[in-house]
Amino acid sequence: MSNSLELPRLNSAELVARFGGDEAALRRYRMLVALLREGRPAGEVARTFGVSRESLRRLRHAFQRDGLAALQSRKRGGGHFARGSPLVRALRQELNADPGVSATILWRRVQARLHDQGFDAPRSTFYRLLAQLRDEETDSAGERMTIKLLREALGGLAEQPPLALGRSELAALLLSGERDALRRGRWLQEVLRAAIGRLRPSAAGPVLDDPHWRHYLVIAGEYEAGEERAALQGALALSASTYSRAKREALERLLALLPLVLDELQPPEPSAALIAPPPAPELLDHEPELEQYMARLRRGGLALVWGPDGVGKRDLAAALAERLQVRGQRVVWHACRSPDVEPNAGLRLLTTLAAALALDNLHELRDMLVTAEPAYALRHLDLLAEALAGRRWTVIIANLHWLNGNDAARVLDVLRATQERRDIRLVLVGNQRPAWADAERWPPLPFADDAAARRLFLARLADQPPKPQPAGQPMIDMLRERISEIVGALPAEAITALPAAQIEQLLAALRPLEARAAELRAALPASSVKREA
């Protein structure tokens, strides 16, 4: 006779008393019931519960060793915190010594420390524990979640698209790293539906008499099927007080399940539309300029498309993107928004690049951003630099004049360094020339109807010596470029937002130009004045 333990037969009340709301433990118990009590083949049990045969073997071995205690879920982190594992100790020591260290550098330091002690640890476990340790600096999400927030979020569960769900407090709490409300809503919708599915008992039983079936039917009925409470209460043959108690218990179970489900589910794949360039115009007024920018990209991997509003920068950049895509090249497009709409331009750019990497099956940066507090997001720039190595993408940033702030500068520095290593190509589109760019090499894009300016622009962009010009032409070219810079520095939307006193100051600063314009008109021959009129 074998000395193996016999699995006790527990009814619903005994299961709740022993395991409480530990759904994973209840599921493990049902797996063992099927395997040890019902005698079903291991392969069939594994397929029924969606696990591997090896997982089933380990579960059975753990039960034989530790009894029912082996079925209970351990705290997140695999027991590292409870037992003070070498990995946790090394993490705490390094974070205490350098709290602002980046994740990649911290991983290398922890690896070195563990190696000296004769230990090793998976990188995935390191990142999971690091996120938990940094969460200790503020209230944890679990402590701040309430039934009230869950009820409010469930009210938007059936909405399509789930924008209200994405804007809920629960979404902001659980998915603070995801900046887009629609993607946040879709992810939380998936998590909530998965958690509700786990409320459903896997074993058949007396539906109306089993409290666990009540929990599932109440939540799924109200929030997924949209049933009225009175109809559900009548169908389940429950009194008002019993229905209210069952709903409260179900919400408590659901609240406990959310962190577990969120930890297990992978973030949804980002939409390819997030990085897609806008459609190219059917007719492009700057075809020769486009060819020169393409040549600059081939030679140096950099193109700076700048000039005043209305010159056609965005159309040219969209046409450039289309031409690159036709040639089989990967284009990542990011359009910066006004600071009034998006105050943290650097984080949004980093999020776009992380989504592009995720679409290329490099999920590490996006996973870190989704789970990190916004204040810590820019600590992951080393991951960005590593992931972009060898990508050979073309990254196009439109509205560069709105890419402001220290965080934005740090992300742009990474992109420039990556471009200089020729890992990527970089196209920057905006109203002003970047301060670090050579003015002679990067002239402003001229207006399509200015033939003289276009000839000079094409010669300069092609690095050709300029043709002999009339004596006054250099002065005209210099003035044209200066005026382009002034106009680019005064976008219409910025002017309308200025107070009256500052508008008067700008007008006073421009009066010398008005006087010069009047003198130029007076110097024109009479025939030219008539033609102008």
Image (cartoon, helix red, strand yellow):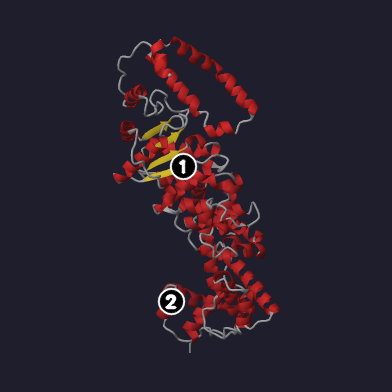
Q: What residue type is labelled 2?
A: Ala
Q: Horizontal and vertical percent for residue 467?
A: 30, 17
Q: Earlier in the sequence, mark 1 or mark 2?
A: 2
Which quadrant of the figure contains the C terminus?
top left
Q: Horizontal and vertical percent for residue 476?
A: 41, 16
Count of numbered labels shown in the rendering: 2
Q: Residue at x 56, y 39 (%)?
A: 339
Q: Can residue 22 be seen in this view?
A: no
Taking depth in this image into account, of 256 and 95 the one nearest to the observer is 256
Asked whether, in this view, residue 54 is left or right of residue 247, the answer is left
Give the residue furthest to the right.
Answer: 241
Asked whether, in this view, residue 136 is left or right of residue 332, the answer is right
Give the residue furthest to the bottom.
Answer: 1
Is residue 497 depicted above or below 128 in this figure? Answer: above
Q: What residue type is labelled 1?
A: Ala
Taking depth in this image into account, of 101 and 335 the one nearest to the observer is 335
Which residue does the numbered mark 2 point to in the structure image?
Answer: 46
What is the spatial separation of the Cα atoms under label 1 and label 2, in whole angstroms?
48 Å
Quarter assignment of residue 280: top left
Q: What element carries label 2?
A: helix
Give the class, few, some or many, for how many residues have Cα within 10 Å of label 2's Cα (few <14, many ≥20): some
Q: What element carries label 1?
A: strand
Q: Residue at x 47, y 50 (%)?
A: 365
Give the class, few, some or many, for how many residues have Cα within 10 Å of label 1's Cα (few <14, many ≥20): many
Q: Residue at x 57, y 59 (%)?
A: 165
Task: Kindly indicate whether the residue at mark 2 contacts the one at mark 1 (C-beta within 8 angstroms).
Answer: no
Taking depth in this image into account, of 208 and 436 the one nearest to the observer is 208
Taking depth in this image into account, of 76 and 145 the one nearest to the observer is 145
* Residue 335: mark in rendering: 1
